[in-house]
């Protein structure tokens, strides 16, 4: 069965709220589209949501490491495979499994975005925060 990324977004948004993040969706930073950008204190996070084309999602999440502290790929739990987990484990990004709840299957590496990039993300979230 196919579940859209929009439905996944709602579940991940609830998870971020519960974890105390402020966040904005469908962000565009430096001409880079990012599904979710989030902020908790000074820590910045990006999440790419994918229902399919996981290779593209990995590439997008890896690209986001240049502008945030932590970057994740979010995938429906029934689409998680050992191969996908292995590919994520070999990269700087984290993997979120989405079902009834969100689980972090692989934590991301802390990135070192420029001060300018980090402040742009923080400003974007503060100006576009979803409640």
Image (cartoon, rainbow, N blue to C red):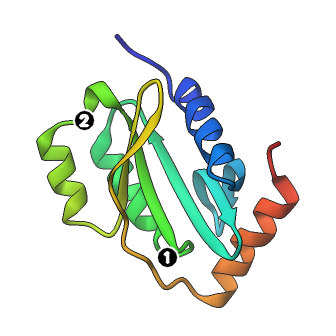
Q: Is residue 49 above or below residue 101?
A: below
Q: State the residue lying farthest toward the bottom.
A: 115
Instruction: Residue 84: name its quadrant.
Output: top left
Q: Which residue is mark 2?
A: 80
Q: Position of residue 2 (x, y in %)?
A: 39, 15
Q: Which mark is residue 110?
A: none
Q: Residues within 10 Å of mark 2 (few under 14, many from 20)?
A: some
Find disc 1 in the rendering and name its residue: 66
Foreground mark, 2 or 1, reads 2
Nearer-N-terminus badge (2/1): 1
What residue lies at 48% left-to-right and 48% top-to-bottom? 48
Q: CA distance from mark 2 to mark 1?
A: 25 Å
85 up-or-down from 66: above or below:
above
Q: Residue at image x 71%, y 72%?
A: 41
- Quarter of image, res 124: bottom right
Q: Is residue 74 above or below residue 58?
A: above
User: Which element type, helix, strand or loop, lies under badge 1?
Assistant: loop
Of 75 and 18, the residue lying toward us:
18
65 lies left or right of 57: right
Which quadrant would the C terminus be assigned to in this image?
top right
Q: Position of residue 104 (x, y in %)?
A: 38, 49
Q: Give x and y (percent) for residue 95.
A: 35, 51
Q: Quadrant of the N terminus?
A: top left
- Element at badge 2? loop
Q: Most extreme residue toward the top, as rendered?
A: 1
- Relative image position of residue 28 (x, y in whole percent): 68, 57
Give 86 or 29, whichever is nearer the viewer: 86
Picture residue at 69% right of the left edge, 76% below the top = 42
Q: 10 Å neighbourhood of mark 1: few (<14), some, or many (≥20)?
A: some
Q: Is residue 123 left or right of residue 52?
A: right
């Amino acid at each position: 069965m196919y579940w859209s990324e929009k439905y996944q977004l709602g579940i991940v948004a609830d998870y971020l709220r519960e974890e105390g993040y402020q966040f904005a969706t469908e962000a565009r930073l430096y001409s880079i589209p990012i599904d979710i950008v989030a902020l908790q204190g000074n820590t910045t996070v990006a999440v790419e949501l994918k229902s399919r084309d996981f290779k593209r999602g990995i590439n997008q999440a890896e690209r986001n490491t240049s502008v945030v502290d932590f970057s994740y790929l979010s995938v429906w739990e029934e689409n998680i495979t050992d191969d996908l987990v292995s590919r994520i484990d070999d990269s700087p990004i984290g993997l979120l499994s989405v079902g009834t709840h969100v689980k972090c299957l692989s934590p991301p590496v802390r990135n070192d975005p420029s001060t300018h990039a980090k402040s742009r993300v923080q400003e974007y979230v503060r100006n576009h925060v979803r409640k």
